[in-house]
Image: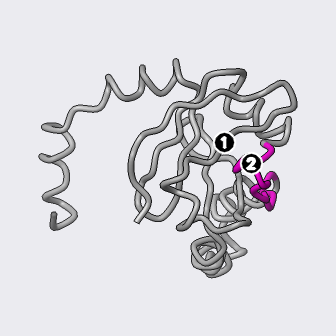
Amino acid sequence: MLMGEYEHTIDSKGRISMPAKLRKDMGDTFVLTKGLDGCLFAFSGQEWINFETKLKSLPLSDKNARNFVRFFLAGATECEIDKQGRFLIPNNLRKAASLEKDVVIIGVGTRLEIWDKTIWKSKDEEISAEEIAENMTMLGI
């Protein structure tokens, strides 16, 4: 399971280090795409297949479903971890998530999220465990 919070810096070429604790679960190659809430999502090969299967099952007749699929697939790219443990974040994805220098990589179970550090700190401060817990009863948690 992917978990934890890791701070890193993007180098001048747009590369970032994959945290050592996450490399085994992510594998040598993984898929990076635009995420929700202003971050990027990174999926291991198997998790990407699982996610892609769910996207394929959405009805083509539904405009929201088509837009949802476009959002994730149009900017998706396969990333490879180099011998130094780094991977390249393409410019279009750096722009989509406002990534410039300092970033935070968080593990959220089946995927990683890559955030601009300032945006993540603000988002993290907004999260209220108590409010979330109250709403989770609707999901049976």
Instruction: Look at 53% across and 33% down and name the residue there.
Output: 104
Instruction: Look at 84% across and 42% down and name the residue there.
Output: 90
Question: Which SS class for mark 2?
Answer: loop
> Seen in the image, is 54 located left or right of residue 139?
right
Q: Amino acid at mark 1?
A: Ser
Q: Magenta segment, which residues?
A: 75-88
> Seen in the image, is 1 located left or right of residue 16?
left
Q: Nearer the viewer, residue 81 or 141?
A: 81
> Seen in the image, is 12 located left or right of residue 42?
right
Above or below for 119 versus 78? above
To which residue does mark 1 refer? 17
Q: Amino acid at mark 2?
A: Gln
Above or below for 117 versus 111? above
Q: Which mark is residue 84?
A: 2
Above or below for 89 versus 137? above
Callout in the foreground (2, 1): 2
CB contact under 8 Å: marks 2 and 1: yes
Q: What's the CA distance linking mark 2 and mark 1?
A: 8 Å
